[in-house]
Image: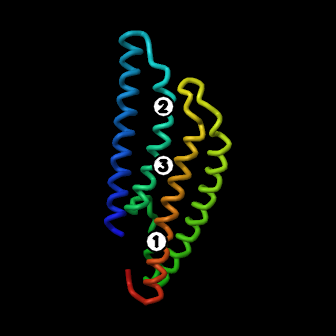
Amino acid sequence: MKSLNSAITKLLEALVVIILTTMSCLVFLNVVLRYGFNSSINITEEVSRYLFVWLAFLGAILAFNENRHVNVTMFTSRLSPHKQKILHLFTDSLMLFCCYLLITGSWVQFKLNLNNMAPISGIPTGITYLASFIAGSAIAILLIIRLFANANHLIKGESK
């Protein structure tokens, strides 16, 4: 299981690097063309916008997987370890519900906007909603794994 997680993480990291490199090259090329040659490539703005959306959602998956999101512990650090585990189960359940809302909402938007094409590139605008669908699904899977692990520790009475 850990090797699969590691392989998926490496794939996501590679995608993020490719997306960031592509965005940087497209924007740099467009700036050089605008200021140096008084022309530009129109498609770069749309493609960069789409890539930025994907970059944000793939980065969110990576950050959640490595537990690097903002964590406010002012309240939780004062609780006993047992109560902390219960609170983690509760907050993870709430996050799983939010993932459900994200997944269902973005799937509906993806289907609605799949036939709407961007004016310059011709890329379907639904592709941006597919990024949130994939991110919500991946984070939901990670949450389910974490919920089962935390519930198992809580039942066994083990400390984290």
- Where residue 51 appears, as percent x and y from the top left, is 46, 38
Say what amino acid the circle numbered 2 marks: Val
- Where residue 34 appears, as percent x and y from the top left, is 41, 15
Q: Quadrant of residue 80?
A: bottom left
Q: CA distance from mark 1 to mark 3?
A: 20 Å
Say what amino acid the circle numbered 1 marks: Ile
Query: Which is more foreground, mark 1 or mark 3?
Result: 1
Q: Is the residue 12 above or below the residue 29 in the image?
A: below
Residue at 52% over, 70% down: 92
Secondary element under disc 1, as helix, strand or loop, is helix
Q: Which residue is mark 3?
A: 57
Q: Which mark is residue 145?
A: 1
Q: Is the residue 38 above or below the residue 160 in the image?
A: above
- Label 2: how many Cα within 10 Å (few below 14, some 14–19, many 20+): some
- Label 3: how many Cα within 10 Å (few below 14, some 14–19, many 20+): many
Q: Quadrant of the C terminus?
A: bottom left
